[in-house]
Image: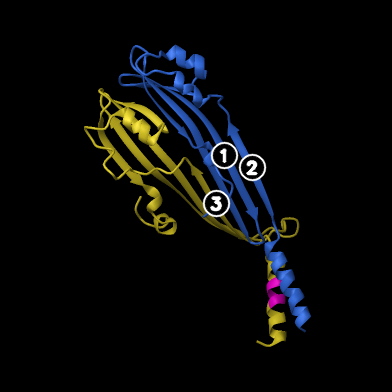
Amino acid sequence: MRPTLNILIVLLVASLLSGCIVLGKNKQFQPFDSTELDKLVPGQTKATEVTEIFGAPSEVVELANGNAYVYKRTVTKGTVCWLLLVTLGNVEKQHDQLVFFFDLSDTLTHYGLSLDAEKAKYGLPR
Amino acid sequence: MDCRVKIFVVLFLLCAGFFLNGCITYQIARYVEGDEVVLPDDGRLQVGETTLSEVLALLGAPDNVAKVGLEDLLVYERALLYRNRIKVGIPIPMSSFIRTSFDASAYGTLVRYDSLALFFNSEGILSHKTFQQGSSHPFFKTLFSSNQ
């Protein structure tokens, strides 16, 4: 009797854990290099110099006293796990973002950098 | 417990799992966009004092930038979506045999935002700030609450 029970328990556990898993990754690539920021001098660098170094921005926003150029790239990682009765899905999207602020004469006043794309992770919902 | 009873219970669970496969499914989904947003509580964001360059050095690039009247708005935001769904039905297509079929599902989706909005005047000084931590609200309680 005992071996039969053990076999049945193994079958039950195996059937409960049966399923499949899918991992996916999406990347919206923008080839800016944040190490090039050393070349910029707020109060001197012009918008044209910024676009020569970093390329065309993803977005240009009009501000009260100038403009902001936004450079953005995105990494999305997704995990889906199908078990017998339960499906678990997790998607995480993170950005690398660089924003330049220009005054009305198109001179760089400030910039901000966030590098979070590498923080996107595979995993299950928590 | 008697060994026969244990075998019966395990066999029942095994059969239930086998025959209910596809009949009952429970889905849990989570979608996150953006990094964690935290309001520094050590006085580093002072209205009337903190400058735009200090904020950019402290928090990095904002997720959104906009013009609001004569001021500039910087938004740091994280979106969290949770969805729970339960589905009960017959996975075999019955339309060839009978006209009726049974399929019922219920789901709840909740999107919560952690947002920090910072307004700057024409001199680049922080004039107003607001922080909303949506993720602090529990999923089921928030989903079924009557508050909009």
Quadrant location of the N terminus of chain B in the rendered image:
bottom right
Residue B81 horizontal/vertical position (percent): 48, 47
Q: Which residue is mark 1?
A: A76
At 73% from the left and 71% from the top, the residue drawn is A10
Badge 1 sits on which subunit? A
User: Do the residues indicated by labels 1 and 3 lie within the same chain of the protein?
Assistant: no
Left or right: B82 in relation to B59: right
What's under tag 3, amino acid-wise? Ala
What's under tag 1, amino acid-wise? Thr
Q: Are marks 2 and 1 in contact (CB under 8 Å)?
A: yes
At 75% from the left and 82% from the top, the residue drawn is A2
Residue A101 horizontal/vertical position (percent): 37, 22
Q: Which mark is residue A85?
A: none
Element under label 3?
Answer: strand
Determine the image quadrant of residue B115.
top left
Element under label 1?
Answer: strand
From this view, report whether residue A107 is shown above or below residue B4.
above
Q: Are marks 2 and 3 in contact (CB under 8 Å)?
A: no
Q: In the picture, which chain is blue?
A: A
